[in-house]
Image (tube, grey):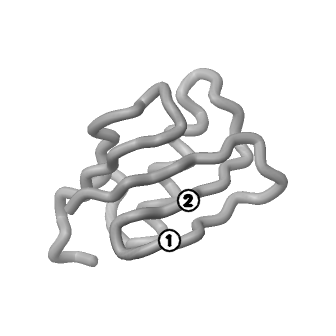
Amino acid sequence: MYIHVKVSLRAKKSEIIELNENHLKIKLVSPPERNRANQELINMLAEYYKIKKSAIKIKKGKYFREKLIEISNSSDI
């Protein structure tokens, strides 16, 4: 399963806004330094979909705000 994500960094609070089934807008508190924002993103998605963090991979956009996320265990969702 693939999900398109638009990330807003340095928000006042972290939250996930579902735009439609495969598009999310995610606000993160973490700065984009030392991969902290990507780690927070993976943690939030794992909690949101109730899956392991290892099942989530950033396929495109590791250094950009728009990302393509692959969830490998789609049967767990």
**Numbered label attached to residue 25:** 2
Q: Residue placed at 48% from the left, 68% from the top? A: 47
The numbered dot on residue 73 is none
Label 2 crowding class (10 Å Cα cut-off): few <14, some 14-19, many 20+? some
Give, as a three-letter code, the residue at label 1.
Leu
Q: Which of marks 1 and 2 is nearer the N terminus?
A: 1
Question: Decide: marks 1, 2 in contact (CB < 8 A)?
Answer: yes
- Quarter placement of the C terminus: bottom left
Viewer-proximal residue among 56 and 3: 3
Q: Label 2, secondary structure: give it.
A: strand
Q: Nearer the viewer, residue 9 or 73?
A: 9
The residue carrying mark 1 is 19
In this view, the residue farthest toward the top is: 34
Image check: 19 left or right of 58?
right
Q: Is 15 placed above or below 68 here?
A: below
Q: Which sits in the foreground, 74 or 66?
A: 66
Q: Where is residue 15 in the image (x, y as percent from the top left)?
A: 66, 64
User: As drawn, is 51 to the left or to the right of 72?
Assistant: right
Q: Tell me the residue at 47%/41% (across/down).
A: 66
Residue pictured at 58% horizontal, 22% vertical: 34
Label 2 amino acid? Answer: Lys
Image coords of residue 64 (percent x, y): 50, 30
Element type where label 1 sits in the image: strand
